[in-house]
Image (tube, rainbow, N blue to C red):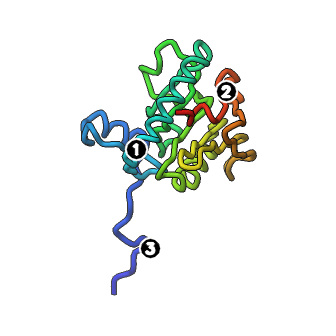
Amino acid sequence: MLAMSAILYPQKHPISAEEYLRMGEAGVFAPEARLELIEGEIVEMAPIGSPHAAAVTRLNELFVQRTAGRALVSPQNPVIVSDRSVPQPDLALLEPRADYYRQSHPKASDVYLVVEVADTTLAFDLGTKVPLYARCGITEAWVVDVNERMIHVFRDPGFAGYGTSFISRPGQSVTCIAVPEASLEVGELFSA
């Protein structure tokens, strides 16, 4: 009689950040594909709706104006947060670097703030991406809820999650701890 294998097949093969980036460079993915690597799995990102795009554009404009010389504003670009995760936050504030990260994508240690904008992806952003950012040591994360017109703010990362969290609404201000110039009154995002 054949002995049963201790491992049942088929098994998923988690993809490393290095494999994922090589696949992208080799043209494995369609140019228009909107993908992220989250905990070793390639995840297709949701299509971008108008309210989502408007919030990203407005945040980008505000942060570029307010953080010049203090941080690089990186909209919807990859960040290597671990050896198995390469998310593309809607916006990241990065430590300035002379090469603008030409030699390599930023790593978690290069990130002052990540911002996710959610209209249809709030549960995924709060339940998957925010805990991932905390485990990987991202100092601060914001999730902009365009439907409820508020910002979920997360600080003090640890393996179990962020130690501090709160919500800011129109009429209230929120400031990035590492880059105080990245401050806004929540209503500025939804004023139009």
- Lower position in the chain sequence, tag 1 or tag 3: 3
Please name the residue shown 73% across and 41% down the image: 156
Q: Position of residue 190 (x, y in %)?
A: 56, 36
> The N terminus is located in which quarter?
bottom left
Kindly indicate whether the residue at mark 2 contacts the one at mark 1 (C-beta within 8 angstroms): no
Q: Which of labels 2 and 3 is toward the front?
A: 2
Q: Which kind of residue does numbered mark 2 sit on?
A: Ser
Please name the residue shown 38% across and 61% down the image: 12
**Residue identifier under label 1:** 49
Q: Badge 3: how crowded within 10 Å, few (<14), some, or many (20+)?
A: few
Q: Where is residue 38 in the image (x, y as percent from the top left)?
A: 47, 49
Kindly indicate whether the residue at mark 3 contacts the one at mark 1 (C-beta within 8 angstroms): no
Q: How far apart are marks 2 and 3 (CA)?
A: 54 Å
Please name the residue shown 67% across and 42% down the image: 169
**Residue identifier under label 3:** 6
Q: How far apart are marks 1 and 2 (CA)?
A: 25 Å
As drawn, the label of residue 183 is 2
Q: Which of 14 and 154 is in front in this view?
A: 154
Q: Nearer the viewer, residue 115 or 97?
A: 115
Q: Which kind of residue does numbered mark 1 sit on?
A: Gly
- Please tell me in which quadrant of the rendered image residue 154 appears: top right
